[in-house]
Amino acid sequence: MGLSSLMSLAVSAELTSAQDLGTARAPVVFRRAVTLDSGTGAGKADKVWSDRRTLAASATEDLDLAGVLLDAFGAAVTFAKVKGIYIAAADTNTNNVIVGAATTNAWATLLNATGTLTLRPGASVGAVAGAADTTTYAVTAGTGDLLKVANSGAGSSVTYDVVIVGSSA
């Protein structure tokens, strides 16, 4: 089974200011993309896992990046390295989605052991290692492989989408 993936980000914005005889414009165009071929070295990936998940009010879960998640074909996914991750909170959420800081065996190469990200309703975040990056975001089975996701409060559930692309070595 092979995998090819493209992870990209594009931002286009324009700042304007009315002037006496016209309008001043400062356009911003920012694009970054990483294409990963099938494999396990730099610029390659052989694993992908994605899901839409719902957490009950005040609930948390640990996504085990080393051997518990199942791919689209029902096979266990064991990441040794994460090359890209994208998480999006549903815009219909009332509570926030908090990502990071698992109590034990935290996957800390992205957010450090105690770092978290707060995704307000409709917010999303992504991180992509560069194609030439040989270190990327390492996963250590049994000691550094849990990505905690939490519902920030009581009263309502939260839904979020997650996509993880990485390699088995």
Image: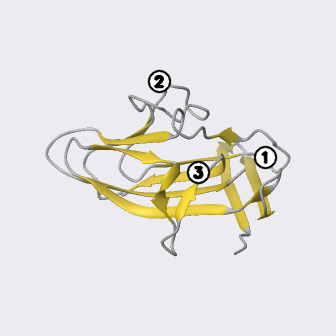
Residue type highlighted by circle 2: Thr
Name the foreground residue: 111 vs 22: 111
Q: In which quarter of the image is the N terminus?
A: bottom right
Labels 2 & 3 near each other (Cβ < 8 A): no
Residue found at x 53% / y 36%: 107
Element on which disc 3 rests: strand
Task: Give x and y (percent) for residue 6.
Answer: 72, 64
**Label 1 is placed on what type of residue?**
Gly
Which residue matches tag 2?
114
User: Which residue is under mark 3?
Assistant: 85
Q: How far apart are marks 2 and 3 (CA)?
A: 18 Å
Q: Position of residue 162 (x, y in %)?
A: 48, 57
**Mark pair 1, 3: CA separation:** 12 Å
Q: Earlier in the sequence, mark 1 or mark 2?
A: 2
Task: Label 2, secondary structure: give it.
Answer: loop
Q: Which amino acid does label 3 sit on?
A: Ile
Pick the front one: 83 or 118 = 83
Q: Mark 1 points at which residue?
A: 130
Q: How crowded is mark 3: few (under 14 residues within 10 Å), some or many (20 or more)?
A: many
Question: Which dot marks residue 1?
Answer: none
In percent of width and height, residue 90 lies at 36, 57
In the picture as drawn, the residue positioned furthest to the right comes out as 132
Label 1 vs 3, first from the N-terminus: 3
